Image (cartoon, coloured by chain):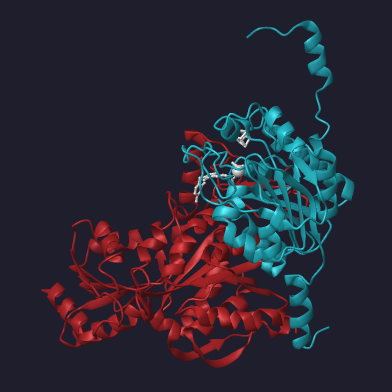
Chain colours: A red, B cyan
Amino acid sequence: MGEERRVLTGEHFLTGDHACAEGGMAAGCMFFGGYPITPSTEIAERMSLRLPEVGGIFIQMEDEMASMNSILGAAWGGWKSMTCTSGPGFSLMMENLGLGIVLETPTVLVNIQRGGPSTGLPTLSGQADMMQAKWGSHGDYEIIALAPNSPQEIFDHTIKAFNLAEQYRTPVLVMSDESVGHMTEKVIIPPREELKLVPRNYTKKKPGEYLPFECGEDEIPEMVKAGDGYKIHITGLTHDKRGYPDISAEAQDWMVRHLMNKIQKNKKKIIEVERINMDDAEVVVVSYGISSRVAHRGMDLARKTGVKVGMLRLITVWPFPDYMIKELAERVKAFVTVELNFGQIALEVERYVAGKAKCYLVPHAGGDVHKPEDIAEAIKEAAK
Amino acid sequence: MNKPAAHLETAIVEQDTHPMADLLRMDRMPHIWCSGCGLGTGLTCFIMALKETGIPEDKVAVVSGIGCTGRVAGYLNLDSFHTTHGRGIPFATGLALANPDLRVVVYSGDGDLVAIGGNHFIHSARRNMDLMVVCVNNFTYGMTGGQAGPTTPISAKASTAPYGSYDYPFNIPYLAIASGATYVARWTSLHMRRLKNSMREALPKKGFRVIEIICPCPTAFARKNRLGSGLDLMKHYHDNSIIKHGADPREADIDMNGKVVCGTFLDIERPTFRDFQTENIAKQLGGE
Ligand SMILES: Cc1ncc(C[n+]2csc(CCOP(=O)(O)OP(=O)(O)O)c2C)c(N)n1
Ligand code: SF4
Ligand SMILES: [Mg+2]
């Protein structure tokens, strides 16, 4: 038992869910509070096996409100923490995702999306929680959400999510899907020393000098943990830089702007996309997660018929790469968004294309993935 | 504004520091609580108890949910967390597990802890989590203006029970014990010495400890039930209390006119969640 069991360096065949858990382990996670739900349960199961090996704690909470709160508490206790869930549990986590955002707490929430609404399709894929990821908790805020499309990527992205959480002192979402969660593929876990991990940005200030929500130009406040003598007070009420409640329009304006700016000002550093066949592209496929793999095939089929089509694969879905869409809209003919819903990210694309190019959606209710042929047809239609 | 009389001015100057100023966030005073509210006396007991235990202040964290009682976290000069309604216990669970050097106290209201947070309360008791829970029971939702709640006695009036509340209230000591708590006591906010002693006793212990404080809420509860001022109500609870250590918790129901059974209902030890983690799991992994 000990830290030597933390990173399972080597070549493995893993499901996406297990790769996600290993990503959490490699990132330094010490605490997992969760509630079982298909298709994310295997992450919790793997963490219950793995965390005790490194002296960490797995706790199965009584529900998802408790799970989400427990990982916030663990973060303020000084540990890296995470949870995972799917549709119905994601809904229950919204209340305290909001608390995490307002307390500016570094932590990671993984959603292995299934078909919804309600209990929906427990064992089948969906991508219809993408707008909930952005707007699901009440009030205005910005969030960071990643969308891995393979077991290797969910391993990498879980580490990336932990790093972003520490860098921006905020909860980060990994918005995967059942297809990725349950597929088995090769996953390479690098040697420990090759992992790039972001440690917690603990303040060097002394108690009395430190304010939990004070920040510089970059809008990112430093952290402390309970028990270190800072005697912090933090609250879910609108607060000032000291963390004290301030129920006024002025304080609200400062706090909400700060929460938005923290992500928006830094978005060019946060956002990652993959561009495929974009050099000569006249039609751009926008996709993410499992849909991006099917869309890739659709793109190849369309290319064979002579259509100049490329793909902008979103690795970071939130914050949305609005500036990239705007720039592309100036020079391409059309956008085709492919996602397992009836147009969530497609709306964002349309919003930033702002009439400068045609916009198409290849919708899907979930429960399966698209047919590449349908995507190819949509691309051809868009190219006309 | 009228100028105070000269002798009053002197009195104000001489009393410029509160005797508990070191453990209160004086920069947050005045507090929001009504005059006659019992929350202040309970908090005084807590501060005295904490000092008497000698536990370093840096090693105590207080977590609250939402409500008048929930504001306690904001007034204590300790690491303090004001979370969401009912969720103090799960937040505190993560905090306590990540940082075993901390004594974690959840300080919240009856509605917070046994209505919206009721599931967390019973499951945390079941796990025997290392948490001390102070539940201030004022028989109502004070913060939101006196609605009926999970402890409102049968027939008591509330803003959402204009004809009287007719669903059965929880008996908190019974609930706590049945769910697995290892230390359970109840006092009224006028039993200041006994309440303080109970808190002093519970603070250093391990496991899930629950102290219920029967607390007057003159504004939201007493007024609707014509029970008089805060002081009247405090006296009423105190005079109608009977102290019976080790009492059967099933006999600790509270109704509008009956007795309030106070005392230490239970004080036992059993392995905590952490004990199981460190002992049983570590053993299987070949550790100590
Ligand atoms: C999810 C949610 N529901 C409702 C509320 C509104 N609310 C705030 S405090 C409170 C009740 C507080 O009652 P109690 O816990 O007994 O505390 P008291 O004010 O009596 O001390 C309610 C219902 C809320 N803040 N959050
Ligand atoms: S409403 Fe009741 S509980 Fe709240 S501060 Fe006033 S008296 Fe106290
Ligand atoms: Mg109450």
Position in image of residue A123 (x %, y %):
39, 82
Asked where in the image residue A86 lies, by quadrant, the reply is bottom left
Name which residue lies at 60% across and 79% down: A47
- Closer to the camera in the image, B254 or A17: B254
Query: Furthest-left residue in view?
Result: A384
Name which residue lies at 75% across and 71% down: B274
Name which residue lies at 38% across and 62% down: A132
Q: Is residue A72 above or below residue B6?
A: below
Quadrant in the picture for the N terminus of chain A: bottom right
How many labels sit on residues?
A: 0
Q: Is residue A82 above or below residue A353?
A: below
Position in image of residue B146 (x %, y %):
53, 38
Q: Is residue A186 left or right of residue A366?
A: right
**Rendered-image quarter of ligand 3:** top right
Asked where in the image residue B236 lies, by quadrant, the reply is top right
- Closer to the camera in the image, A132 or A286: A132
Position in image of residue B84 (x %, y %):
56, 51
Query: Furthest-front residue in view?
Result: B258
Name which residue lies at 44% across and 60% down: A268
Q: Is residue A33 above or below residue B287?
A: above
- Closer to the camera in the image, B41 or A266: B41
Q: Is residue A12 left or right of residue A118?
A: right
Q: Is residue A276 left or right of residue A245?
A: left
**Can residue B285 be spotted in the picture?**
no
